[in-house]
């Protein structure tokens, strides 16, 4: 179909020119019109930097130090800001990892969709809104004629991600950069979003670069896969060949990760935290409905379910970020105040939370040092050298070099590095119970495996209790003692890990388990078909 993008010998640097930090070194990429190229590799491999460079864009503090970027005959490495502004949104679009952090919370979805067509003169306001409704329908969003009039916080994460993809298509670009677009989605929603993205790019012949650390996902989307490490290309192969016979040892190591299997818990453990008839509402909508749940001391309880099932609301109620409208929360048998502002310092210290979106949970103006010193000082009272030493200990726990990272600001970190800082911030309080809200969703398989091993070790050494909210059922199978399945704000099934995975009682649970991506290029088509059939059976009772 003809070449669209050519990158040759690209070098990106950060820091002072006399002692630069190399972000990309000698990168070569080619992309034809209508082709999808997958970029995979560990956190910090340079995947996102390469994707942004394909737009002629670099993050603050990063510069193009060599090489060329040719997009349809235009040299993006040397293009003026005016040229780039005319291309961005019109011919090259970007779909970010965090939809929640990318939309303006003060404007409705449909108004933000219309900004691109109006700015580039491809449509007037009325035509842009009509096109938004048509694309929302193609993206299989519910109530496509009306959903655009909602604000970003009024739709689920999966719906927001699809709305962002529709917005990227507003001017019918030649190239879309997908940067981890399904990382934060549950497995059933991921099937819908992946299918919708693939359908819409195929329909309009749009080329794409699909950046991800999920090897099973990229195998569903890409025609070819490029593996990256330390800012360099390791190998590039057609997808099927890459799956069947990767040539490089590093690539084979990526394919072989996730060998964790925490031993099953034995015996009973006393409850540490209990919910009795807990309900919660958003503007009259019941997000939690009569939750009865006991979380055992020293154990890991995984909470799974589709987007909008109530998992994160449950976490907010436990953490005191949202007061229950009915029922109560007990800590070691004693009632906890519904709002964190009414809890004492010991209770605040005991219950900590690691958030799903590190981009929105960490202050971008702070350095890593400031991010960690504040909770260490507040919760432990350490000052001076003792506080600095504790911060360095936390950095070592999360396997980041204090010398390299403590004085970096949060935006200078990769997605996985940010999430590790979020984990360290929670550990700074020396808690007894940690709510882990999708803590490995932004991490590649190798880093995620290390983090999970770290959490298991900390639990064994410190007796920590975890509530692990995740859409990654491989993670659940690896680390959970108990599994709770949620749907529509209710618990529909709960039990020991082996019982849920080996003999689930509910059809919904069986559908969740069947939705886990597989390293098979034909999996998505089968999964979409099976999901449609399963939903029909669930609706029929």
Image (cartoon, rainbow, N blue to C red):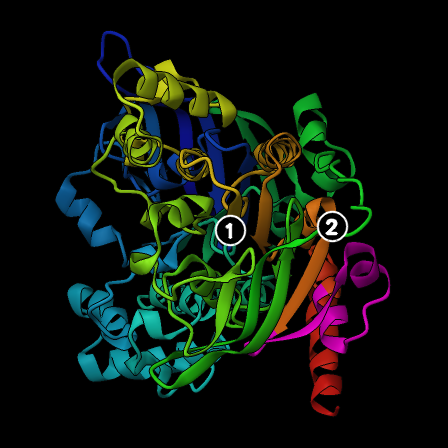
Find residue 435 and name its label.
Answer: 1
- Please tell me how many numbered marks the rendered image carries: 2
What crowding class fits label 1: few (fewer than 14 Cα within 10 Å), some (14-19), or many (20 or more)?
many
Circle 1 SS class: strand
Horizontal side, residue 161 vs residue 375: left or right: right
The answer to whether 331 is drawn above or below residue 345 in the figure is below
Q: Residue furthest right?
A: 503
Magenta segment, which residues? 487-512
Q: Residue at x 18, y 50 (%)?
A: 85
Closer to the camera, 345 or 66?
A: 345
Closer to the camera, 200 or 281?
A: 281
Circle 2 SS class: helix
- The C terminus lies in quadrant: bottom right
The answer to whether 317 is drawn above or below residue 448 in the figure is below
What crowding class fits label 2: few (fewer than 14 Cα within 10 Å), some (14-19), or many (20 or more)?
some
Residue 86 x/y as whole percent: 19, 53
Q: Residue at x 27, y 81 (%)?
A: 129
Q: Specify whether residue 490 is painted magenta.
A: yes
Horizontal side, residue 263 vs residue 172: left or right: right
Closer to the camera, 186 or 181?
A: 186
Residue 192 x/y as whole percent: 58, 69
User: Where is mark 2, residue-wise?
Assistant: 477
- Alpha carbons under labels 1 and 2: distance apart: 18 Å
Choose the circle earlier in sequence order: 1 or 2. 1
Q: Residue at x 59, y 33 (%)?
A: 462
Residue 80 x/y as whole percent: 15, 39
Q: Is residue 222 visible?
A: no
The answer to whether 356 is drawn above or below residue 462 in the figure is below
Q: Residue furthest front?
A: 334
Q: Is residue 269 visible?
A: yes
Q: Residue at x 22, y 12 (%)?
A: 17
Query: Where, by quadrant of the figure, is residue 41 drawn?
Result: top right
């Amino acid at each position: 179909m003809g070449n669209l993008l050519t990158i040759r010998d690209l070098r990106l640097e950060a820091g002072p020119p006399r002692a630069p930090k190399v972000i990309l070194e000698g990168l070569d990429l080619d992309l034809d019109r209508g082709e999808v190229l997958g970029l995979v590799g560990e956190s910090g491999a340079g995947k996102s930097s390469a994707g942004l460079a394909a737009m002629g864009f670099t993050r603050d503090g990063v510069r193009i130090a060599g090489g060329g970027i040719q997009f349809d005959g235009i040299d993006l490495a040397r293009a003026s800001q005016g040229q780039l502004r005319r291309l961005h949104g019109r011919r090259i679009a970007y779909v970010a990892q965090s939809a929640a952090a990318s939309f303006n919370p003060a404007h409705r979805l449909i108004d933000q969709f219309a900004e691109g067509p109006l700015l580039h003169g491809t449509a007037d306001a009325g035509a842009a809104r009509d096109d938004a409704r048509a694309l929302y329908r193609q993206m299989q969003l519910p109530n496509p004629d009306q959903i655009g009039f909602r604000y970003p916080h009024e739709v689920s994460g999966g719906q927001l991600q699809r709305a962002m993809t529709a917005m990227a298509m507003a001017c019918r670009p030649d190239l879309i950069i997908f940067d981890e677009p399904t990382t934060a989605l549950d497995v059933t929603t991921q099937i819908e979003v992946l299918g919708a993205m693939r359908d819409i790019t195929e329909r309009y012949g749009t080329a794409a670069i699909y950046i991800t650390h999920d090897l099973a996902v990229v195998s569903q989307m890409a025609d070819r896969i490029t593996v990256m490490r330390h800012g360099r290309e390791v190998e590039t192969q057609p997808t099927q060949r890459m799956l069947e016979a990767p040539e490089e040892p590093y690539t084979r190591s990526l394919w072989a990760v996730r060998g964790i299997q925490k031993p099953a818990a034995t015996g009973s453990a006393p409850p540490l935290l209990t919910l009795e008839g807990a309900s919660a509402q958003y503007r009259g909508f019941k997000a939690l409905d009569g939750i009865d749940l006991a979380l055992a001391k020293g154990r890991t309880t995984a909470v799974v379910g589709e987007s909008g099932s109530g998992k994160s609301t449950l976490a907010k109620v436990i953490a005191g970020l949202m007061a229950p409208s009915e029922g109560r929360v007990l800590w070691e048998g004693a009632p906890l105040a519904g709002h964190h502002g009414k809890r004492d310092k010991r209770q605040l210290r005991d219950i900590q939370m690691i958030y799903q979106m590190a981009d929105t949970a960490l202050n971008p103006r702070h350095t890593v040092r400031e991010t960690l010193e504040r909770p260490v000082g507040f919760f432990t009272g350490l000052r001076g050298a003792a506080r600095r030493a504790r911060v360095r200990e936390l950095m070592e726990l999360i396997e980041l070099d204090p010398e390299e990272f403590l004085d970096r600001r949060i935006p200078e970190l990769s997605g996985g590095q940010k999430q590790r800082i979020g984990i360290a911030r929670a550990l700074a309080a020396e808690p007894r119970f940690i709510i882990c809200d999708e803590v490995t969703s932004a991490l590649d398989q190798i880093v995620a495996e290390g983090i999970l091993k770290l959490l298991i070790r900390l639990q064994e050494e410190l007796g920590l209790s975890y509530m692990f909210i995740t859409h990654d059922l491989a993670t659940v199978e690896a680390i959970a003692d108990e599994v709770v399945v949620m749907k529509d704000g209710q618990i529909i099934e709960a039990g020991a890990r082996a019982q849920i995975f080996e003999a689930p009682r509910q059809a919904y649970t069986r559908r969740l388990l069947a939705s886990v991506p597989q390293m098979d290029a034909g999996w998505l088509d089968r999964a979409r078909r099976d999901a449609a059939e399963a939903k029909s059976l669930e609706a029929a009772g």
